[in-house]
Image: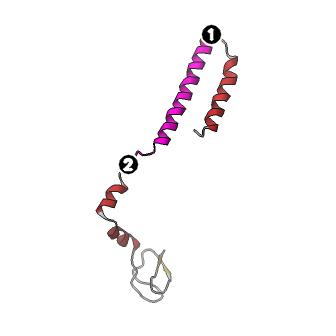
Amino acid sequence: MITCTKCGQKNNNAAKACSKCGHKLQSGRKRLESEISQQERREMFHLKLEKNKRFSKHGEAWVYALFLLGAVIFFTYNQVYWPLYALTPAIALLAWFRKI
């Protein structure tokens, strides 16, 4: 819906003029495109990898997963399974408390 800037009447998106006062309707898209500078356009599509905390959390999650995988392999090789029943929820709780 396009709102008329003169009288405030809501009109269809395809309308060229206001149905109430006849004022020419303007699309906000053209105005927005003209206001955005060339530098802002480049920055809009530039991938920023400044979220180091996010990537460090992923690394920490991989450490937990690899530790758990190593424990599963070790205890399965030795055919002792009971430590896995305690270790798996402990690692899950650790990851949950660390908000990973």
For the residue marked with disc 2, what is the amino acid? Leu
Q: How many angstroms separate mark 2 from mark 1 (CA)?
A: 47 Å
According to the image, label 2 marks what residue?
47
Residue 37, position in %: x, y? 31, 65
Does residue 48 lie above or below 34 as drawn? above
Q: Is residue 88 above or below residue 57?
A: above
Residue farthest bottom in this picture: 21
Furthest-left residue in this view: 38
The magenta region covers 49-76
Count of numbered circles in the view: 2
Q: Secondary structure at mark 2?
A: loop
Residue 69 shown in magenta:
yes
Image position of 49 with respect to 26: above or below: above
From the image, tell me which residue sits under label 1. 78
Return the residue nearer the eye: 79 or 55. 55
Q: With 100 as the anchor, is 22 left or right in this view? A: left
**Residue 68 within the magenta-colored segment of the rendering:** yes
Of helix, strand and loop, which mostly describes the magenta segment? helix
Q: What amino acid does circle 1 point to? A: Asn
